[in-house]
Structures are given as structure tokens and as C-alpha cells.
Image (cartoon, grey):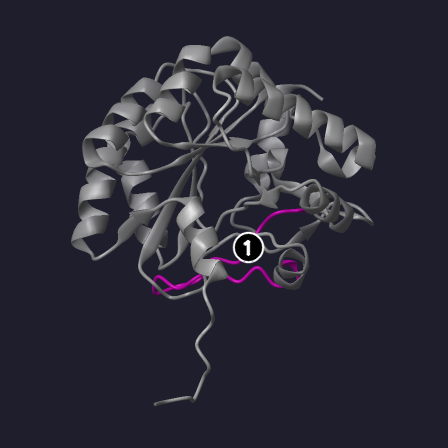
């Protein structure tokens, strides 16, 4: 299956009701909520909870987690990095093996600027079709590529290509020390040549935004790059704070409040 078909398939899954791909595999999707509430992921939530996966910050805090998927470079990542640096916003970039091979300088800058690099599969493979050994080999080969750019890089987070997963792939990745990160806000933003202008990307995010959002954007979109500064400024005006996935993990380690308890 070529990259274009994979991408189209991934897009069809976004913002849909949970969709079963096969007897053992699923395609990530959700039912959009209204009034800036977190989306309903239905049967997927208990599966993610069981294997320590995330798609949202459930705390209710007005925190936002920016994540970008990079499969290839279209010339807009540097602009995105410039805005993030100027605005002092952390982000996570989920990279493929091709991207690291082709764009080592940009990967180096991501790390130097303090961003997190996530594992998006070395070969952009369907995790549900792999054995545990094959999954481990794919993830570890990508992690080694990242560490070849900087041996200080910590690669903890994984995002499956096309959002395709199974209980086994979640379990195996968890056993290998990786944390699955899905998303609670996304839109069709990867079609080069079909740009709709920065205002379209801006409106998509602002209309869907909710406390705890893990936002998925693609760096191949000029619309995203051009909208990013306005998004950051206006979301901050609405009281949102941009956090990193590491902040989310630290929050999860804190003791949960006891409901109904008062001193």
C-alpha cells in the first residue's frame, strides 16, 4: 500500500465514531462533542486505560498538548519551529524513519529547542499486522535513529501510523516501554495542493478546542504553519496553557483527589 493510500485511509478515520478495522484491529476515531467538551471515544477508552494509552488530559485543566506528525518534509517545519520558539510553546513531533534519514538538521533543531520526539514507526507500518518481534524491531530501529541524532534523546511516546491499533499492539508497545499517544482534536490538513488558507486551520482548531486537548497537526500543511501564531495567541487569551506530554505524564503520577473528601 503506497503512502497516498495510507494517508487517505488515515483521514477517513478522523473524527468518526469508533471504527473496527478487523477482528483484532481498530482505527482510531471519535464522536465530536459540542460546547468545547472532550470527544467520546466509546469502547476505545477502557482499552487505552488498560494499556496506559492516552488521547486526552482528563483532568479538566485548560491545558493543551501540541503534537505534529512528520512523514516527509514539505518546507513548513522550520516556520513552525520558529513560531514555537518565539512563543515558548513545547510540542511533540512524531517522526518516521524516512523523515529522520532525510531531515537530520531539522530533527536536531527540534531536540535543541526542547521539543519531544515521538516514534511514528520506522517504516510507517500497520502495527496490527506485525508480530511482537516485528513491532519491537520497527520501534527500536526508529528509536536508534533518533538517538543517533542525539544520544540524550528520550523516546517514550509512540503514535501508530494511520491510528491503527489492536489490544496486542498496545500491550506489546507498553511492555517495550512505549506510551501510546492518540489525539482528541484533528482535521483534514495533509492534502498538499488543496490548501484552504490559514483561517481554515485556525477555525478547525478553535471550533473543536476543549480542556485537555491533544492536538494532531501535520507539518506538510502551509495552512497550519501560517495559523499557528494566531492559534497560540488566541488560545492563551481564552485561558489555555500549552504543556508537553511529559507534563501530562507527571500529572498522571500525582495522587488523585478523593471525591467528597474535605478537611
Residue at point 40% right, 53% down?
A: 213
Residue at point 30% right, 25% down?
A: 81
Quick one: SS at disc 1?
loop
Question: Which residue bears the numbered disc 1?
Answer: 30
Q: Is residue 110 above or below residue 66?
A: above
Predominant secondary structure, magenta span = loop
On the picture, is 134 further left or further right than 154?
Answer: right
Q: Position of residue 90 (x, y in %)?
A: 33, 38
Residue 29: say if magenta.
Answer: yes
Q: In this view, does 74 lie above or below 200?
A: above
Q: In this view, does 169 lie above or below 225?
A: below
- Along the viewing direction, whichever of 225 and 92 lies nearer the viewer: 92
Residue at point 34% right, 63% down?
A: 61
Disc 1 packing (10 Å; few <14; some 14–19; many ≥20) = many
Residue at point 32% right, 52% down?
A: 207
Residue 217 occupies which quadrant of the picture? Answer: top left
- Along the viewing direction, whichever of 155 and 16 lies nearer the viewer: 155
- Along the viewing direction, whichever of 28 and 130 lies nearer the viewer: 130
On the picture, is 79 further left or further right than 86?
Answer: right
Please state the total of marks drawn on the protein image.
1
Q: Where is residue 178 in the image (x, y as percent from the top left)?
A: 62, 41
Q: Position of residue 11 (x, y in %)?
A: 55, 37
Which residue is most to the front?
Answer: 152
- Along the viewing direction, whichever of 220 and 151 lies nearer the viewer: 151
Q: In this view, does 104 lie above or below 166?
A: above
Q: In which quarter of the image is the C terminus?
A: bottom left
Residue 169: say if magenta.
Answer: no
Q: Position of residue 247 (x, y in %)?
A: 40, 50
Q: In which quarter of the image is the N terminus?
A: top right
- What span is in magenta? 27-44
Amino acid at each position: 500500500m503506497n503512502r497516498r493510500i495510507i494517508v487517505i485511509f488515515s483521514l477517513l478515520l478522523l473524527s468518526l465514531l469508533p471504527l473496527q478495522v478487523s477482528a483484532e484491529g481498530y482505527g482510531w476515531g471519535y464522536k465530536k462533542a459540542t460546547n468545547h467538551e472532550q470527544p467520546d471515544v466509546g469502547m476505545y477508552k477502557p482499552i487505552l486505560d488498560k494499556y496506559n494509552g492516552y488521547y486526552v488530559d482528563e483532568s479538566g485543566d485548560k491545558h493543551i498538548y501540541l503534537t505534529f506528525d512528520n512523514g516527509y518534509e514539505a518546507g513548513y517545519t522550520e516556520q513552525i519551529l520558529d513560531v514555537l520558539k518565539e512563543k515558548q510553546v513545547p510540542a511533540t513531533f512524531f517522526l518516521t524513519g524516512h523523515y529522520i534519514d532525510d531531515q537530520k538538521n531539522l530533527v536536531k533543531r527540534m531536540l535543541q529547542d526542547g521539543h519531544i520526539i515521538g516514534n511514528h514507526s520506522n517504516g510507517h507500518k500497520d502495527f496490527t499486522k506485525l508480530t511482537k518481534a516485528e513491532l519491537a524491531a520497527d520501534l527500536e530501529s526508529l528509536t536508534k535513529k533518533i538517538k543517533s541524532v542525539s544520544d540524550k534523546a528520550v523516546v517514550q511516546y509512540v503514535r501508530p501510523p494511520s491510528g491503527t491499533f489492536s489490544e496486542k499492539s498496545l500491550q506489546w508497545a507498553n511492555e517495550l516501554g512505549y506510551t501510546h499517544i492518540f489525539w482528541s482534536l484533528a482535521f483534514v490538513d495533509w492534502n498538499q495542493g488543496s490548501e484552504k488558507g490559514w483561517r481554515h486551520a485556525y477555525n478547525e482548531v478553535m471550533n473543536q478546542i476543549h480542556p485537555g486537548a491533544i492536538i494532531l497537526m501535520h507539518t506538510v500543511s502551509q495552512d497550519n504553519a501560517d495559523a499557528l501564531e494566531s492559534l497560540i495567541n488566541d488560545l492563551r487569551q481564552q485561558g489555555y496553557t500549552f504543556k508537553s506530554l511529559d507534563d501530562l505524564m507527571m500529572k498522571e503520577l500525582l495522587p488523585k483527589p478523593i471525591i467528597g473528601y474535605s478537611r
